[in-house]
Image (cartoon, helix red, strand yellow):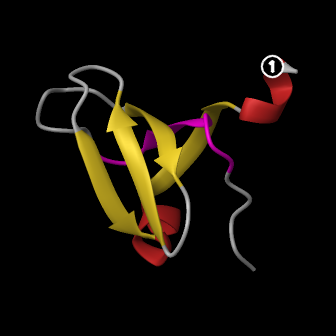
């Protein structure tokens, strides 16, 4: 079953980005997931399957802010 991901979710990945950041914001949904590093601002596109394997936890959910 696919992971329930929404625009604006902040996730923590298993491995750090080369800049040292672990936290990413979801900025695009579809077959590919677009994420933005909250430390340096770099944007990356990952296939959904690869994204789901790399996610460690959700730091904040977009639905919690409402």
What residue does disc 1 label?
65
Among the 4 quarters of the image, the one containing residue 9: top right
Q: Residue furthest left?
A: 18
Per the picture, the main secondary structure of the magenta-coloured stretch is: loop
Foreground: 34 or 4? Answer: 34
Foreground: 62 or 28? Answer: 28
Q: Which residues are magenta?
A: 6-15
Q: Is residue 65 above or below residue 12?
A: above
How many numbered discs sit on the rendered protein? 1
Foreground: 21 or 42? Answer: 42
Q: Is residue 37 left or right of residue 17?
A: right
Q: Is residue 54 above or below residue 13?
A: below
> Is residue 64 on the magenta stretch?
no
Mark 1 neighbour density, 10 Å: few (under 14) some (14–19) many (20 or more) = few
> Is residue 10 on the magenta stretch?
yes
Residue at point 50% right, 76% down?
A: 31
């Amino acid at each position: 079953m696919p992971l329930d991901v929404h625009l604006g979710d902040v996730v923590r990945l298993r491995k750090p980005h080369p800049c040292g950041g672990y936290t990413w914001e979801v900025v695009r949904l579809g077959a590919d997931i677009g994420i933005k590093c909250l430390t340096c601002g770099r944007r990356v596109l990952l296939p959904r399957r690869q994204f789901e394997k790399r996610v460690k936890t959700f730091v904040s959910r977009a639905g919690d802010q409402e």
